[in-house]
Amino acid sequence: MNNARTRRIIGAGLLLVGFMAGIGLRYLPSEAQVPDEGVASISSPKVNAQQGQQQQWEYETDPEIIKSVLSGGVPMDRWNEGLMFQGIEPMPWLVSAANWFPNTEEVQPDELRITFMGTTPTIRPGQMNTSVFVELGNGDSFIFDLGEGSIANYLASGIPFNKINDIFITHLHVDHFGSLPYAYVFGAWGGRWHEPFRVYGPSGRNEEDGIGYMIEGMKMMTHWHKEAFSVFPIGQGWDIEVTEFDYQDDGGTVYDKNGVKVTHWRQSHAKDGASAYRLDWNGLSVVFSGDGRPNSLTETYAEGVDVLITELQTEVVAISSQVQGVPPFVGRYTIDTHHNPAYAAGYLANKVKPRLLMTTHMPFDAYLNPETVAEIREHWKGPYHPGAPDMIVVNVTKDKLWVREGIIAEFPNLKPPNADVSIALYGGLVVPPPLLQREDIQGQFIRDAEIPPEEYYPRGYMPQLMQSWPTDKAIFIPDSLVPPSMKSKRRGNN
Ligand SMILES: [Zn+2]
Ligand SMILES: [Zn+2]
């Protein structure tokens, strides 16, 4: 095949693939990539003589006509569509441009992906308490707030229990950390055997107001549970590494590792000790401002950010009080002391001018959404998408941004624990010995009161019971025998 012919075929191939895939003209190559002779070369097909059944069409040969049909009357490059913005478009590697499905896409090396795992303070099916998950192309992942119920969306998204780690809490309202105790104890059971649970958060006016104090309380609250689960392999699972930063250190760095930097500043949320965060990596950035009143510090520290995520309250207090059951004076007072009116979210966005404004911590309701958009649009005319309801997925690269609805099963199963940390440390998966046996934490009386298995298992069936852990030694499984489903595709970063 000579080069000119190769070029022609590639040109025609691209054109046809784009057209026939039925995915719209955005995947058609630009005019420059499709020379006229490329179009001409698709004017008559090769007829397979052996099949010989094809309709004997007469084929159009005028390249201009062919081009005018395939481009549907618009330029071969992208054209301006309504109010859509340049750069708000799907990346070609997305499995579906409409939806995200768990375990179907790798975050690309220069890509950042955000998933809204919880999106409202008033928990309800479809909207768990606030949590924002950020995954980076280097294999690292970060959690901003872990509100009650949000963990169900993590697990349904195929995130193994032991990857639910590196959790940055904006403030200590329970709707922002309610899933923490669950993630802590079940994460340890679910394979977080070789690294501590890592939590980051602000200090407060007094020692009792800091995240460290709350974590001490969580350790106490989970005492019974931890001891009971200590009959399982746990290893380091009960260790908690708390990073409590000075809440007044506006612009301070709380995390700086592996090219990832997380900074923080104060939020006005009725009480000291509420923070906003910004993550920077590889020239991409996200701000999650947590809860709080419109704040000039966010204007300063969010400068140049790609995705600005802020909370929002739509100003329809009288109507919302009827729909949501919140007395209007309570609603009004709550907004004016704690929260960010939708008008202010738009105002802030217009100051910061992010590539994309997203709002979360908001009810996602048909009666409310158009009003929310209108209030934001009072000041902000740029790209906007709600970070609600749950499972809104955002792909971010330097030149494109795309928002999709993530599709999760109603009754999903767990993904096996990720063995990367163990493999990095030991060259394989180490199953640590349990810290305790049943005898250490349970009286003989109640074990003797158990109904003998022979009485309930049918004749001919008797499983090999494992009523105590058979060894006090660790078990080693070499890397080569660890199933691929327990390994990240990108290794060595976590
Ligand atoms: Zn909240
Ligand atoms: Zn709050």
Image: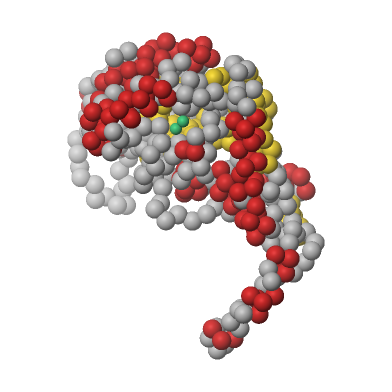
Which quadrant: the C terminus?
Answer: top right
Residue 25's place in the image compared with 104, above or below, is above
Query: Which of the pair 351/33 is nearer the observer?
Result: 351
Query: Which of the pair 369/332 is nearer the observer?
Result: 332
Q: Which residue corresponds to the image point at 44% horizontal and 13% vertical from the top-left?
A: 352
Residue 100 on image: x %, y %: 41, 40
Query: Which of the pair 413/195 is nearer the observer?
Result: 195
Is residue 91 in sight in this rendering? yes
Q: Which residue corresponds to the image point at 48% horizontal and 20% vertical from the top-left?
A: 268
Residue 200 on image: x %, y %: 62, 32
- Residue 247, quarter of picture: top right
Left/right placement of residue 55 relative to residue 350 reads left
Residue 326 on image: x %, y %: 30, 35
Which residue is at the far right? 473
* Total numbered labels placed on residues in the image: 0
Left/right placement of residue 186 relative to residue 156 reads right
- Residue 128, quarter of picture: top left
Left/right placement of residue 107 relative to residue 76 reads right
Residue 448's place in the image compared with 295, above or below, is below
Q: Which residue corresponds to the image point at 65% horizontal and 25% vertical from the top-left?
A: 245
Residue 365 on image: x %, y %: 28, 36
